[in-house]
Amino acid sequence: MQTEIEKNVMRRIYRIRILYGIFSLATASLLLLVLSLWGIGREVWVAAVFANGPQNFSGHLLYLLYAFLHTRLIVQFLCLVVLASLFYLAYQTARFLTDFGGFARA
């Protein structure tokens, strides 16, 4: 049977654990990703960029590279922030899956 002090301590530990999940770097990265995508959407008419490009895969990659190199600096910066956020979220997801036994270990 838990005493009143133990209950209070465990309640505080539970709250700290919840706040850690809410204010983690992964959450900040996700928020940064969403804000960067919103900023790109405000600066560039994204649908027109994809509609104007070629439809084959290699030509599309070259077209997107050309479009990236010839756009404004703020859009280039936001694209790099999106890329960094995606890499960080992928890293955190892989770490989460391996830490909690999501993948079988030999």
Image (cartoon, helix red, strand yellow):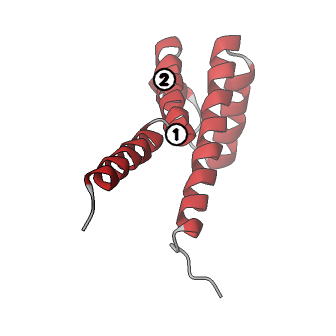
As shown in the figure, which amino acid type bears the numbered disc 2? Leu
Q: Mark 1 points at which residue?
A: 24
In percent of the image, x 51 and y 69: which residue is there?
100
On screen, residue 101 above or below 95: below
Which residue of the protein is positioned furthest toward the bottom in this rendering?
106
Q: Nearer the viewer, residue 60 or 8?
A: 8
| Position of residue 26 in the picture relative to residue 61 (left or right) | left
Q: Name the residue under label 2.
A: 35
Q: Can residue 72 be seen in this view?
A: no
Q: Position of residue 53 (x, y in %)?
A: 58, 31
Q: Which residue is nearer to you in this view: 86 or 105?
A: 105
The mark found on residue 49 in the picture is none
Q: Going 72% across and 36% down the picture, which residue do you hit?
A: 62
Q: Is mark 2 on a helix, strand or loop?
A: helix
Q: Position of residue 57 (x, y in %)?
A: 63, 48
Can I make out residue 37 in this image?
yes
Q: Are marks 1 and 2 in contact (CB under 8 Å)?
A: no
Q: In which quarter of the image is the N terminus?
A: bottom left
Q: Residue at x 52, y 74 (%)?
A: 101
The amino acid type of the residue labelled 1 equals Ser
Q: Residues within 10 Å of mark 1 (few under 14, many from 20)?
A: few
Q: Which of marks 1 and 2 is in front?
A: 1
Which image quadrant for residue 36?
Answer: top right
Instruction: Specify few, some or many for label 2: CA neighbours under 10 Å numbering under 14, 14-19, or 20 or more.
Output: some
